[in-house]
Image (spheres, coloured by chain):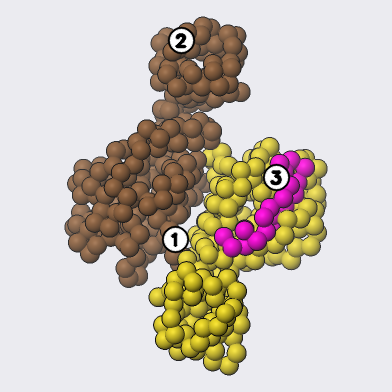
Chain colours: A yellow, B brown
Amino acid sequence: MKRFYSKNIQSNYIYLEDNEAQHCTKVLRCKQGDKIEILNGEGKRFEAEIQAINKHEVQAQIIRILQTETVNKNKLSVAICPTKNPARFEWFLEKVTEIGVHQIFPILTTRTEKQSIKQDRMQNIVLSAAKQSSQLFFPILHELQPLKNVIESDNFEQHFIAHCKDEKQHLKNAYSPNQSAIILIGPEGDFTSEEINIALNKNYIPVSLGNSILRVETAGVVACSIIQMVNEI
Amino acid sequence: MKRFYSKNIQSNYIYLEDNEAQHCTKVLRCKQGDKIEILNGEGKRFEAEIQAINKHEVQAQIIRILQTETVNKNKLSVAICPTKNPARFEWFLEKVTEIGVHQIFPILTTRTEKQSIKQDRMQNIVLSAAKQSSQLFFPILHELQPLKNVIESDNFEQHFIAHCKDEKQHLKNAYSPNQSAIILIGPEGDFTSEEINIALNKNYIPVSLGNSILRVETAGVVACSIIQMVNEI
């Protein structure tokens, strides 16, 4: 069944808006009476039937709730620098969304080469990956911001930093299952000592993601994969 | 230090050949007397000094062995279908090489959409990812072949199949650490029941890679990440 996203739910109707409505009617050519699947990105998956198609809106009647979760199983949030090659960062976004991630914080550090991201484009990549992989909770993609802001404003149960200096314990051992956690992934060329110290002073725990030398975007994906694996039975 | 690949070692000299020699002299413009790093893809990393640069060959004298391993730590081999979009398969090759994989078997199944791969191009992607991530043992990329051949000709200690049907145990629980293993990753649209039965009859164990719905290429990467994680201390 074709899958869409909408938060606009009124009594037993769901309304697809803007791009989602366009995608439904113009691209996938759905018609009145078609049955579709809708995710609200906040724990629910519905089966619905299209009632009316307007210019910028599709009205669908809820037939039943296919799936519902009250707690977001995605515990890890990732703070990571945009990569010089945007395709690598886009790939990172798609993959962590598929695997399952809570929040994504694109960050600026001393050695961040890429100083900007196309927020809308990135948001769309996350949205379509979330729909494609039928995520009950969609990742929150934040605006690009300085590392310092993320470290100071965070509210996670556990805090990790993956930098390249000296021996560290493996994330799988450092992480206590089912707690919310954030991991800082260093840029190519790593965090500066000053940046690492700022994190350490905020009780961030240095962790390793394994023996391999990973690219920035790969490190982000492997971190998500590790946390999901620890939390899955 | 610039990193290259060569298996051509004679007494205390290493010879870069063909593309590697070209890359060294034409692209990276290395000169006589330059110190370089060379991986043999079979457990050794050398420091060497360029002695002579010929048309299709670079002669380098070994200064010392920087790193040596006798046993390949990469225990997982992956049998996977080429994806419709070649970029996704190339991405898979790069990422599993970074994370660590033993052998890659591109396979043809009933529902494989893409019936061919550019072997040389794929081989180069593996090679550069292996150099970039300084892998001591390079993955073996096999030619595209029918699933049946892989199942019949295998010599692994453990055998897993990741298909989408019914409940399965998680790969992390099914896998016994530090044993060689192969995992079959289904194509988009999954394996056919017949293909699954062929594997089951050869004692392949059905496994899950987690709760998320993963694309083919993501499943391959997550499988490698899980096995590495289980084996790492």
Q: Which residue is mark 3?
A: A114
Residue A126, compared with residue B9, is above or below; it is below
Residue A103, compared with residue B133, is above or below; it is below
- Residue displayed at 49% across by 18% down: B22
Q: Which residue is mark 1?
A: B214
Q: Residues within 10 Å of mark 2 (few under 14, many from 20)?
A: few
Q: Of all residues shown, which one is farthest toward the bottom?
A: A11
For this rendering, which residue is in front, A165 or A18? A18
Question: SS at mark 1?
Answer: loop
Query: Disc 1 or 2, which lies upstream in sequence?
Result: 2
- Disc 1 to disc 3: CB gap under 8 Å: no
Q: In this picture, which residue range is highlighted in magenta? A: A105-125
- Residue displayed at 58% across by 15% down: B30
Give the quarter of the image for residue B77. Answer: top left
Amino acid at the residue labelled 2: Lys
Residue A150: % across, % down? 76, 58
- Residue displayed at 61% across by 66% down: A139
Residue B91: % across, % down? 47, 46
Residue A198: % across, % down? 80, 49
Q: CA distance from mark 1 to mark 3?
A: 29 Å
Identify the chain of the residue marked 3, using the numbered disc in the image.
Answer: A
Q: Which residue is mark 2?
A: B55
